Image (cartoon, rainbow, N blue to C red):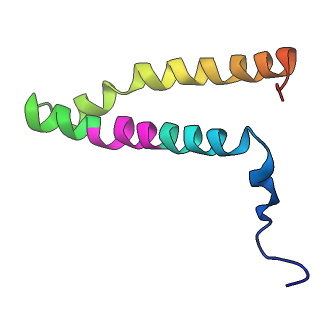
Amino acid sequence: MRVPFLDLQVFKYAGYTPAMLLTGLSYSGLIIATVLLPLFYQRIFNFSPLVSGLLMVPAAIFLSQLNPRAGQMLNKIGLKN
């Protein structure tokens, strides 16, 4: 095709593949933390859904504070090639 639907030339950059793997791992961790952990609390510790949900709030607050700071660090330091 003259104009491919998906540009595979991004894989020639050295940092692209590791970045994609790390992104996949971080999303997997996010799914584990937000879905499986409350179920674990309910099944193992016999917590109610409300209590198991409330146990997730501190992590959400921590991440909501960390995300803007990570963006500020990226702006300050910049990307490394």
Q: Residue at x 19, y 36 (%)?
A: 40
Q: Residue at x 25, y 31 (%)?
A: 52
Measured as percent of width and height from the top left, residue 39 is found at 21, 41
Q: Quadrant of the N terminus?
A: bottom right
Q: Quadrant of the C terminus?
A: top right
Q: Quadrant of residue 53?
A: top left
79 to the left or right of 60:
right
Q: Is residue 43 rendered magenta in the image?
A: no
Magenta stretch secondary structure, dominant: helix
59 to the left or right of 64:
left
Q: Quadrant of residue 57?
A: top left
66 to the left or right of 53:
right
Instruction: State whether residue 46 appears in this view.
Output: no
Measured as percent of width and height from the top left, residue 15 is found at 73, 38
Provide the residue span drawn in magenta.
28-36
Q: Nearer the viewer, residue 14 or 63?
A: 14
Q: Is residue 34 rendered magenta in the image?
A: yes
52 to the left or right of 19:
left
